[in-house]
Amino acid sequence: MRMYDLIYKKKNGGKLTKEEIDFIVQGYTKGEIPDYQMSAFLMAVCLKGMDMEETTDLTLSMRDSGETLDMSKIDGVTVDKHSTGGVGDKTSLCLSAMVAACGVPVAKMSGRGLGHTGGTIDKLESIDGFSTSITPEEFFDHVNKNKFALMGQTADLAPADKKIYALRDVTATVDCIPLIASSIMSKKLASGAEAIVLDVKTGSGAFMKTLEDAVTLAEAMVKIGNNAGRETSAVITNMDQPLGRAVGNALEVIEAIDLLKGEGPEDLMDDCLALGSLMLIAGKVAKTKEEAEVMLKATITEKTALKKFADFVEAQGGDQEFVYNTDKFKKATLIDPVPSPVSGYVKSIRADEIGMCSLILGGGRETKESTIDLSVGLILQKKVGDRVEKGETLAYIHSNSKEKTEAAMERFLKAYSFSDEKPEPGKTILAFVAPDGKVTYN
Ligand code: URA
C-alpha cells in the first residue's frame, strides 16, 4: 500500500477500506508517514468527507493505537459524559456528583486542554490538595467506594488522535465532522466506560455554529458509539451565551458547588437534568426521563450530591472544607464592575468573546506551556432577556492585573448587544439523539 495512492483516492471522493485506514493511522502514529502526506490526506477528508463506515473504522483504528482501559473491575454500569466544549461549561463537576449520588458509577478521565479556561482537572486544582495523579487501581477503588473518581488522561490513550489533532490544529482541518467525531469517540472508547452520554454544544461559543451541524455531529458520534458496543446517546445544548454566570476556573467550581447547594443558575440545572437523565437510564437505575429527573432533583434537596462531591474531593487529596465554605477559594485581587453603556434589554452575548476575556485575564492556556491563573474570570450579572439600566453592572471582572482588567473590559463590551424590545430567551436544551439514532427536538 502507498500513502500517495490513498491520498489520491480520497481526493477523488473514493471510499477507503478498513485496511487502508489502519495503514494510514498506524503508519502516521509510528512516524512512517510524514506530516506533509498526512496533512494532504486530512484536507482531502475535509473536502470530500467520509461515510459512516469509514468514520467508524477511523475511530476504532485511533482507539487501538494505544492503551484501552478495562472498567470491568467497577461494580455497576459505568457511564461517562463528554462535552464538545463551551464557555462557562462546568457541568461535569456538578452532574457527576448528582449521577453518582443516584448510584451510577462515574469513572471520568479528563484532560487539561487549551482554551479560554482550563479543563476539568485545572478547575478542580483550585481546591487545595486536589490531585488526579492516581493509579488505575486507586481510580477503580475510589469509584467502587464513592461511585465517582477522576483521573488525568494518560499519554497512551489514543496516541494517534493526539498526533493527528496537533496536525489538524495547524492545517485548518479541525472543523470537519468525521474528523471531530472520530477524534472524540476514539478517546471515549479507549477510556472504557460502558455507556456514553454526549453534550454537543451549538452556537457562538461552540465548534458547531448551527443546530443542523450539531445534530449531524451528534448522530455520527451516537452511531460510532453504538456500533462499537457502547450505549451512546446525546443532548444538543445551547452555547449562544455562556452557561451559568461564572467563567473562569475557581469561579466555575464555586458555581458548580452552589448548584449542589440548590443555589445554581437555571440553565446549568437544565443541562444537568437533561444529561443526567440519559446517564441514569444508561446506568439502568431509571426507566424514563421523568423518573430520572425526580431522582436527580432529590440529590439536590437532600444534599446527597453535595456530600458526594465533598467525599470525592477528600478521596483525591483535596480539602473538603472548600465545598462547605467556598470563601476558602483563592480570590483575585481586583474585582471590578462593568457598567452597561445603555439602557435596554440584553439581546445577545457572544460566548466566544466572553471566553476571550477569560483568556486575556490569564484564565486559559494559549499554548501547552502556559500557566493558568485559577482565580481570575468573570461573573455575569445580566444574561439574554434581562433588563438593564445605563450604568448598572453587567458583570464583575476578577483579575490580578489592572492592564488585563482594562483589556478584558474593552473586549467584554463588544460581546453584548442590546435592544429596546425584550427578546425571547433561547432554550437551553435543543434536541436529543437516542441510542437508536432517533432525533427529538425540544
Ligand atoms: N475535541 C476533540 O477531542 N477533537 C476534536 O476534533 C474536536 C474537539
Image (cartoon, rainbow, N blue to C red):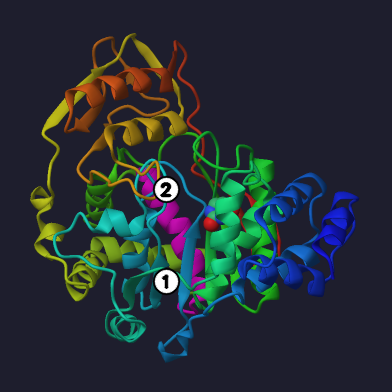
Q: Is residue 240 visible?
A: yes
The amino acid type found where label 1 is placed reads Thr
Q: Secondary structure at mark 2?
A: loop
x and y, in percent, of residue 59 in the image? 66, 67
Q: Is residue 366 left or right of residue 331?
A: right
- Residue at image x 16%, y 33%? 400
Residue at numbered disc 1: 154
> Residue 78: image x %, image y %?
46, 79
Q: Position of residue 434 (x, y in %)?
A: 64, 64
Q: Nearer the viewer, residue 22 or 342?
A: 22
Spatial CA span between label 1 and label 2: 17 Å
Residue denoted by label 2: 114
Residue 330 versus residue 260: which sits nearer the camera?
330
Q: Earlier in the sequence, mark 1 or mark 2?
A: 2
Query: Relative to 238, is 377 on the left or the right?
Result: left
Residue 51, above or below 311: above
Query: Does 79 sit above or below residue 398?
Result: below
Between residue 222 and residue 178, name the one nearer to us: 178
Amino acid type indicated by mark 2: Leu
The magenta-colored residue range is 266-285
